[in-house]
Image (tube, rainbow, N blue to C red):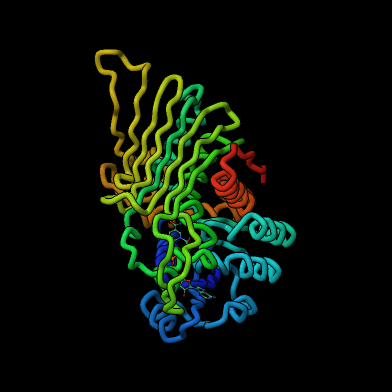
C-alpha cells in the first residue's frame, strides 16, 4: 500500500474523531493508500506530545506553518477552531497539499469563497467534514430518494437540539467554550448546528432558494474565559428558519442550545408523495420509513435496522444485525475521500459544497436581522 502522510491540526474532539478514522480506515476498506500519522500540530507542545503518544503520531509541531512547510506531509487535516480554517486551508492549498477541513468551512462566505478559490486554483483534492451524510441510514435515505421512491417531495423538517449553555455562568471563549465567542466561532448555532442540517438537506433534497429566519441570544453578557471580563455575547443561542427548496418543497429548520433534556438531538423528516423518511442521531443506525404503497392492512412506519451487507457501508464492518455508530461516519468519510483520489472522481462535500452551506447560514442570519425573506446565493 502507498502511504498517505497525514498532518493533523487540532487535538480536541475532532482531532480524536479524525485520527481514529485515519487509523482504522485501511483495516476495513480496500484502498491503495494507507494513512500514516506523520504529525500532530497544536500550540501547546506538551499536550500535543501526549496526544501523539496516545494515538501514535510520529512527530509534533506547534506551528501549523511549519507543518505545512514539511515535504513529508501529503494531507493537511484542519480539526481546529473555525477562526483558523481559512488561513490554514489557503496556505495548505498553495503548498500543494490535499486539504480536509472541519465545518463550517469559513467564518463567513467571504472567507469560504477564498478557500474555494485556493483549492480550485491549486487543483488539490479537498473535503469538508460534514460527516452525517455518511451515517449508513442517512446514505440509505439518499439512495431511496434518488431512486424516486418518495416521489415528489413536499416537506423537509430538521432540528438540532442541545442544552449545554442554559446556565448564565458558562463563560464565552477559551478551550471548551470557544463556540460562544463570535470572534472564534463566526456564529452560534446557525453555523455550528444548522450547518449540519443544511448540508444533509441539500444533499438529500437539492438546493435552497430563499429563507426567512429568526435568532435569539438569551444570555446577553457572559464572562470571557481568557480576559475574565464580562462581555456582550455575539453569537445566536437559538435559530429557526423557513426555507423554500428549488424543487418546490417547503422546509423548517431549528437549532438551539436551550432545549433542556436534549444533548445532540439531530433529526430530519422528509414527506414525499408516496413515502416518508425520519432519522434521529440518537438512534443513528435506524431509518424510519413509511410507504403508502404497502397493503393497507399492514401499512405503518417501519423501523429499518441498517446493518445488512447490502445497505450502505455495512459490508465493510461486522455481521448483519450488529450496528455501528458516530465514529464510523468519519471512517466512511476518509474511505470515500481516498477512494475519490484513487478513482479521479472527487468525493463530496467539497469546499464548494461547504460554501453552498455557508451561503444558506449567511442568508438565515441576514434575514433574522432584516426580518425579510432572503435569497440564497448559489455556490
Ligand atoms: N463534524 C462534526 O460532527 C463536528 C463536531 C464537533 C466540532 N466540529 C468542528 O471541528 C472543529 C474543532 O472543534 P472541536 O469540537 O474539536 O473543538 P476543540 O475545542 O475540542 O478542539 C479545537 C482544537 O483546535 C486547536 N486550535 C485552535 N487554534 C489553533 C491554532 N492556531 N493552531 C493549532 N491548533 C489550534 C485547539 O488547541 C484545540 O486542540 C470546529 O471547526 C468545529 O466546528 C465538527
Q: Is residue 369 above or below residue 311?
A: below
The residue depicted at 52 percent of the width and 42 percent of the height is: 213
Q: Is residue 92 above or below residue 31?
A: below
Q: Position of residue 71 (x, y in %)?
A: 64, 78
Q: Nearer the viewer, residue 211 or 111?
A: 211
Residue 118 lies in quadrant: bottom right
Q: Is residue 309 above or below residue 20?
A: above
The residue depicted at 62 percent of the width and 78 percent of the height is: 65
Q: Residue furthest right?
A: 121
Picture mark count: 0
Q: Is residue 46 left or right of residue 103?
A: left
Q: Position of residue 160 (x, y in %)?
A: 39, 47
Q: Position of residue 25 (x, y in %)?
A: 44, 60
Q: Position of residue 27 (x, y in %)?
A: 40, 60
Q: Residue furthest top?
A: 296
Q: Residue furthest bottom?
A: 46
Residue 343 visible within the image: no
Q: Nearer the viewer, residue 85 or 149?
A: 85
The residue depicted at 33 percent of the width and 68 percent of the height is: 169
Q: Is residue 310 left or right of residue 84?
A: left
Q: Nearer the viewer, residue 168 or 240?
A: 168
Amino acid at each position: 500500500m502507498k502511504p498517505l502522510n497525514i498532518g493533523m491540526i487540532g487535538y480536541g474532539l475532532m482531532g480524536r474523531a479524525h485520527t481514529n478514522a485515519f487509523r482504522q480506515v485501511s483495516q476495513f476498506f480496500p484502498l491503495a493508500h494507507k494513512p500514516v500519522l506523520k504529525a500532530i500540530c497544536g500550540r501547546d507542545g506538551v499536550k500535543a506530545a501526549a496526544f501523539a503518544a496516545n494515538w501514535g503520531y510520529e512527530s509534533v509541531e506547534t506551528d501549523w506553518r511549519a507543518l505545512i512547510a514539511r515535504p513529508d506531509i501529503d494531507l493537511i487535516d484542519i480539526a481546529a477552531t473555525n477562526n483558523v480554517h481559512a488561513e490554514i486551508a489557503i496556505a495548505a492549498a498553495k503548498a500543494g497539499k490535499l486539504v480536509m477541513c472541519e465545518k463550517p468551512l469559513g467564518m463567513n462566505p467571504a472567507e469560504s469563497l477564498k478557500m474555494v478559490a485556493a483549492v480550485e486554483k491549486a487543483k488539490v483534492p479537498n473535503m469538508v467534514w460534514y460527516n452525517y451524510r455518511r451515517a449508513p441510514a442517512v446514505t440509505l435515505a439518499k439512495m431511496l430518494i434518488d431512486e424516486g421512491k418518495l416521489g415528489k417531495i413536499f416537506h423537509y423538517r430538521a432540528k438540532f437540539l442541545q442544552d449545554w449553555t442554559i446556565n448564565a455562568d458558562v463563560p464565552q471563549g477559551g478551550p471548551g467554550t470557544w463556540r460562544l465567542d463570535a470572534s472564534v466561532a463566526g456564529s452560534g448555532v446557525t453555523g455550528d448546528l444548522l450547518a449540519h442540517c443544511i448540508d444533509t438537506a441539500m444533499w438529500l433534497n437539492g438546493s435552497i432558494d430563499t429563507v426567512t429566519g429568526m435568532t435569539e441570544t438569551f444570555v446577553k453578557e457572559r464572562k470571557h474565559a481568557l480576559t475574565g471580563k464580562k462581555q456582550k455575547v455575539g453569537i445566536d443561542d437559538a435559530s429557526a428558519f423557513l426555507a423554500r427548496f428549488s424543487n418546490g418543497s417547503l422546509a423548517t429548520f431549528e437549532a438551539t442550545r436551550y432545549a433542556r433534556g436534549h444533548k445532540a438531538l439531530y433529526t430530519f423528516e422528509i414527506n414525499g408523495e408516496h413515502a416518508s423518511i425520519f432519522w434521529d442521531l440518537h438512534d443513528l443506525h435506524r431509518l424510519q420509513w413509511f410507504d403508502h404503497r404497502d397493503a393497507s392492512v399492514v401499512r405503518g412506519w417501519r423501523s429499518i435496522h441498517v446493518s445488512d451487507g447490502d445497505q450502505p457501508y455495512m459490508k465493510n464492518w461486522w455481521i448483519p444485525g450488529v450496528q455501528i455508530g458516530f465514529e464510523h461516519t468519519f471512517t466512511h468519510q476518509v474511505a470515500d475521500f481516498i477512494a475519490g483520489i484513487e478513482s479521479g472522481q472527487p468525493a463530496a462535500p467539497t469546499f464548494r459544497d461547504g460554501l453552498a452551506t455557508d451561503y444558506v447560514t449567511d442568508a438565515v442570519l441576514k434575514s433574522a436581522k432584516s426580518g425579510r425573506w432572503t435569497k440564497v446565493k448559489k455556490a
